[in-house]
Image: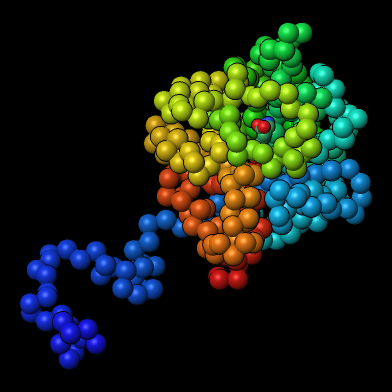
Amino acid sequence: RPVNLDPMGRPDAATRLDLTHRPRRNRKADWTRRLTRENTLTVADLIWPIFVMDGSDARTPVSSMPGVERLSVDQAVREAERAAGLGIPALALFPYTDPELRTVDGREALNRDNLVCRTLRAIKDAVPEIGLITDVALDPYTSHGHDGLLSPDGRILNDETIAVLIEQSLVQAEAGADVIAPSDMMDGRVGAIRRALDAEGHLDAQILAYSAKYASAFYGPFRDAVGSTGCLKGDKRTYQMDPANGTEALREAALDIEEGADMLMVKPGLPYLDIVWRLKDTFGLPTFAYQVSGEYAMIEAAARNGWLDGERAMMESLMAFKRAGADGVLTYFAPRVAEKLAREA
Ligand code: PBG
């Protein structure tokens, strides 16, 4: 017993501070911590990004994302069933495109029978209640790994790229995509895609605009997962945003909203919580954050080395997005979190 406590365990008169406010009172036990908690994380906050590949009954590990696998379409359907059973609202699909199908112009993006379209149809057929989000960008399909078309002298062409993205969006919507998510950061793509979707009768197809997508080092493992690591020539800094900029994200989001975006996304996640907060606070649209591959890999790597408690770090990182005002999070942890929440309920 410390000497400055009386026999009842109270501070003696000489030690006691005359404090009006003791914020620790509200933290003294689990019941009061629960009662005063400001934010909650539920399964309805989760969007699960999955990697799909050719083949049947196959899964291959992504080495830079321990615990994450690429799935053949039939396995993706099984995981979609599991996700729906857990109450995860939506999946985001990313294809690992066979290198032989990657071309300078990324034309496989427009193949109505490409991997993404086949996955959309298979999941819609088996699990119609789960939401399906598809990325609109050319990088899984280009031999140079860029999200857009290249000019002969190696510049990324904006308007020419958008002409292709419009077609890619229509192909995805026709195959059953509920949410079209342009992730390429070309100028004017949201408006162009909205007009095309409407003209073709896809009035209910939502657009989730990657409004603030930064040229980030944290995408490294993703490029490994979709097989574009080796092929990317140069970097994406003429279209993705400079990590030094915050106010520019407000202008990007304002344009996307004006052009018809239904929801906004910020990417990466944890290093950009200020952007999440500013977008939500300014515009009030449904706003999502993408806890990207590198963020997942950092937590997982440290956890597997015994350097931190992985499960707690996972939950804390996701709660941080809620605290910053995000309506939901794209996270590779989604099924693990959903299972944990279900166990605890
Ligand atoms: C590409 C795209 C990327 C991610 C999602 N869509 C990578 C990139 O811009 O190079 C990254 C996601 C992640 O790292 O988890 N359009």
Of residues 29 and 125, the one drawn nearer to the viewer in this rendering: 29
- In the rendered image, the vertical position of residue 188 relative to residue 172, given as above or below: above
Of residues 272 and 87, the one drawn nearer to the viewer in this rendering: 272
- In the rendered image, the vertical position of residue 293 relative to residue 41, given as above or below: above
Q: Residue at x 60, y 39 (%)?
A: 218
If the image is split into quadrants, where does the C terminus sit?
Answer: bottom right
Q: Is residue 287 visible?
A: yes
Q: Is residue 124 visible?
A: no
Residue 12 spot, x, y in % from top left = 11, 81
Q: Residue furthest bottom?
A: 7
Which picture quadrant has residue 85?
bottom right
Which picture quadrant has residue 262?
top right
Residue 20 spot, x, y in % from top left = 12, 64
> Is residue 10 left or right of 170 when viewed as pictured?
left
> Is residue 240 left or right of 110 when viewed as pictured?
left
Residue 319 spot, x, y in % from top left = 48, 54
Q: Residue at x 45, y 26 (%)?
A: 245
Q: Residue at x 79, y 37 (%)?
A: 227
Of residues 157 and 160, the one drawn nearer to the viewer in this rendering: 157
Which picture quadrant has residue 150?
top right
- In the rendered image, the vertical position of residue 282 relative to residue 37, given as above or below: above
Colour style of the rendered protein structure: rainbow
If the image is split into quadrants, where does the N terminus sit?
Answer: bottom left
Residue 116 spot, x, y in % from top left = 80, 37
> Is residue 181 left or right of 72 when viewed as pictured?
left
- In the rendered image, the vertical position of residue 98 relative to residue 3, given as above or below: above
Image quadrant of ligand 1 equals top right
